[in-house]
Image (spheres, grey):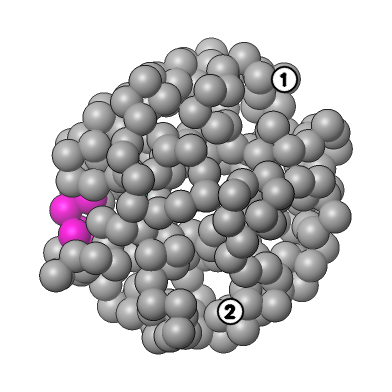
Amino acid sequence: MIKIAPSILSADYAALGQAVDLLRPWGADWVHLDVMDGAFVPNITFGAPMTKALRKHTDLVFDAHLMVNEPAKWVQDFKNAGADIVTIHIEADRHAHRTLQLIRSLGMKAGVALNPQTPPSAIEYLLESCDLVLVMTVNPGFGGQKFIREAAEKIKVIRKMLDERGLRDVEIEVDGGVNAETAKLCAGYGATVLVAGNAVYSSPDPAKMIETLKNTK
Ligand code: DX5
Ligand code: ZN
């Protein structure tokens, strides 16, 4: 079954603790934490201190998406803050292989993210070093954007690359513009985790939305 990782980027910033409290009763699997530095992406959100504060609100998996330059500088802080998964952008790190090793050495799962224009070939030699590939289907920086269909094509290609290497346990997470309709495409291409910010937090019935996304065929 597909796992759902709601992004708190679309939650009420004045009440993020409560926004996280709601996720387990709503049936979420992970909490997607969109960390932005205002340099790698044109927006600033929050960092490890906020992550640490939210950690005591839930035991759900903390899925930290680092949209930051030189992510290696922050890995230890996110370990200390209680992150379970740390995903770096291949476009933001000249030594991504080393950073993925660092994340794993600290006992966390390591993810690598691809912006819409970045080809799967960019991570071909990292697949054995990661536990998750994050396919961006929007240009990172904001929630509530339109799903970029051509970027979703990469899900199929990455699934094939992983299968050819026998890497069946590596998650393919899709992030950006996911809703009941686009989720079908992602699931059909082989995605195993869906991030959903706007679709969940703006829904009149978030629990129902999560259930719908989870049962996408
Ligand atoms: C964008 C973030 C996404 C975004 C998803 O930079 O990485 O996680 O919050 O939000 P929706 O689901 O609203 O597109
Ligand atoms: Zn994200």
Q: Is residue 150 above or below residue 61?
A: above
Residue 63 falls in which quadrant of the image?
bottom right
Disc 1 residue crowd, few under 14, some 14–19, many 20+, Cα 10 Å: few
Quarter assignment of residue 25: bottom left
Q: Residue at x 35, y 30 (%)?
A: 148
Give the labeled residue for mark 2. Answer: 55
Q: Position of residue 66 (x, y in %)?
A: 65, 52
Residue 152: % across, % down: 37, 26
Residue placed under numbered mark 1 in the picture:
125
Question: Residue 142, position in %: x, y?
Answer: 46, 52
Whole-number angstrom distance, CA of label 2 to CA of label 1:
33 Å
- Residue at horizontal 40 percent and vertical 54 percent from the top: 143
Span of residues in magenta:
209-213
Q: Residue at the spot x=61%, y=84% of the render?
A: 53
Mark found first going from the N terminus, 2 or 1: 2
| Residue 21 against residue 150 in the figure, above or below | below
Residue 163 appears in the rendering = no
Residue 12 vertical placement versus 72 (above, below): below
Q: Amino acid at mark 1?
A: Tyr
Q: Is residue 93 above or below residue 73?
A: above
Query: Of 64 and 106, which appears nearest the observer?
Result: 64
Which mark, residue 163?
none
Q: Secondary structure at mark 1?
A: helix
Dot 2, crowdedness within 10 Å: few (<14), some or many (≥20)? some
The three-letter amino acid code for the residue at tag 2 is Arg
Where the C terminus falls, by quadrant? top left
Residue 126 can be seen, yes or no:
yes
| Quarter location, residue 125 | top right
- Left or right: residue 156 versus residue 26 is right
At which x and y percent is residue 137? 41, 35
Which residue is drawn at the image coordinates 19% and 65% (left, top)?
Answer: 203
